[in-house]
Image: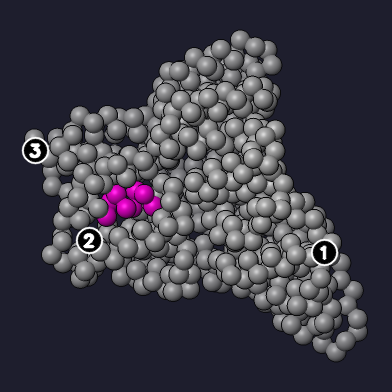
Amino acid sequence: MLTAVGLLGSASVLALQPRTVSGEGERIAGAELALESGDCRAASESYARAAEASRDPRVSRRATDVALGCAHLPAAWQSAQRWSSLDPENVDSLRAAGLVALELWRIDDARRLFASLLAKPDVEADRALGDLLPLVTDGEHAPAAWLAFDKVVDRTTVSSETLVLLARLAAAADNLAAAGQALELAAQKAPGIGSSASAARLRAGIAVASAQPEAALDAARDAARIDPVDEAFAVAETLVDLDRTEEAYREIERLAAFPESRAEAERRLALLALSSGDFADAQRRFAARLQRGTGAAEAVFYLAVIAERRGDKDLALQSYRRLVDAGAGLLPRVRAASLLLEKGERDAALALLDQHLAAHRDAVVEIETAKAQLLADAGLGAEAVASIDAALERHPRHPNLLYQRAMLLERAGRTREALRLFESLLEARPDEGTVLNALGYTLADRGKQLSRAERLIRRALESRPDNAAFLDSLGWVRYRRSDPRGAVPLLERAWRLARDAEIAAHWGEVLWVAGDQAQARMVWARALARAPDSRPLREVVERFTGPAASPAAPTPAAPGAAASEDQPGGRP
């Protein structure tokens, strides 16, 4: 979630001293009292009403700030619009309204607001974009931001530095061709900037995704040569991305010989051992770091992960609790809560997340989502849906929570309700790739309306052509439409982009059914080394290779229901 501080560029809350206008002071006082008492929804809605009734832009600014802090996006949009209408020359008001529009996937409004901001005579475009683009590049807002800024930024007038930032945004939005084009323009404008370390690292990532390993390594070497301090591990990271683990080990061991990079090299060797499934080596390395006092919290966490994977869940829980007591973030709490749920200690498990929520209101949506997913993973589907419903009461119509509700309904077997909610989300946000993909994949996975499912997924890929999840969905729907050989290259590319366990499960299944059982086993083995706890992956491997599997290739769940692919079908 974009924070109010990030949007408004201010680390302090605006102090309001409203004029003595009939009702205005009372409305503001009531909103502040609601905020102090923890009733975020009432505070946001009261402030939005106060902003509508007031002609003081400070009131609407404060209302926007409160609504964003409370994750009440409809109220934030109402208040931000009011602020920008009262103070249209204020760059902060346009910036805030534009970023709220991105959160709500109001792409046309975002374009209008950002174009107005950049057109201001006192606004230096490069400086403004230098502030804005990094804010929206790292995180879930990148796809919406790319759709907005792609149309707003005049490539002929901005600097090469801004073009590199734009390339990073395009890559984060899964449009590697557009990222490459922006990098080329940057190099043409200023060869020095176009060949900077950050540009070289981005070129390396694009080459990895494009199955050009030598180009990727050449670019990574350029990055390390240009910036030998911050990009010392560029080649090692690229080798990992290319799945060339042994070469990555050798490169990191080479860097471990230098005093200035030894500590980070030892850390990376430990992480690489863990991701490769070598728990003994990973445990030895993290234990050594813990003994030296280097990265102690991280070492405790990964030692707990290793203990959990080896079946020593009491030791894992003890370690996670140590981190929680020391003020650790969300991930150790989620893992501890998961183990507590396994032990039947539901209240203690949920308390861990509720305590974190009370102290981190700026991460409310992330925490509420984690809680609901935790319940779903524990087999408590109805309680998971109820948890997300309660979150929606506090944060009405939040798009992320609505999306999670649809996903949870589908997991709980309430497919009809999930599909209805996905259809509703799509009606409200017809061009959002995540919703298009989710609806298409759910239809395909249930054997419903397969031709429509494929159209939806292809629409999702139009704006995000290099999204691994979308490519996986397209491969899956092709498989469901009796085209396993056509599905294989899509799934292979999806794996190369993301190395995700569920993608590996799909890719291996399709390879098996296409007749390449040896390659399927290899894909599954590599993925299990990376993600041994993946339930979807283990279920597929067991179904195809376990004792109950027949010597011949098992029949998949329902690919090839072509006779009824445009009719509702599958599980209700």
Pointers 3 and 1 in contact (C-beta within 8 Å)? no
In this figure, which residue is indicated by the disc labeled 2? 447
Q: Which residue is mark 1?
A: 121
Label 2: which secondary element = loop
Q: Earlier in the sequence, mark 1 or mark 2?
A: 1
Q: Residue at x 53, y 49 (%)?
A: 178
Disc 2: CA contacts within 10 A as few (<14), some (14-19) or many (>=20):
many
Going from the N terminus, do you reach mark 3 or mark 1 first? 1
Relative to 332, residue 43 above or below: below
Q: CA distance from mark 1 to mark 2?
A: 56 Å
Q: Is residue 475 magenta?
A: yes
Seen in the picture, residue 398 relative to 221 is either above or below; the reply is: below
Per the image, label 1 sits on a secondary structure element best described as loop
Q: Secondary structure at mark 3?
A: loop
Q: Nearer the viewer, mark 1 or mark 2?
A: 1
For badge 1, the amino acid type reads Pro
Q: Which of disc 2 and disc 3 is earlier in sequence?
A: 2
Q: Nearer the viewer, residue 275 or 118?
A: 118
Residue 441 horizontal side relative to residue 210, left or right: left
Q: Measured from the top left, where is residue 450 in percent x and y?
A: 24, 62
- The outermost residue toward the top is 257
Q: Are marks 3 and 2 in contact (CB under 8 Å)?
A: no
Quarter occupied by the C terminus: bottom left
Where is residue 115, by image quadrant? Answer: bottom right
Could you tell me if residue 35 is visible in this image? no
Q: Which residue is mark 3?
A: 552
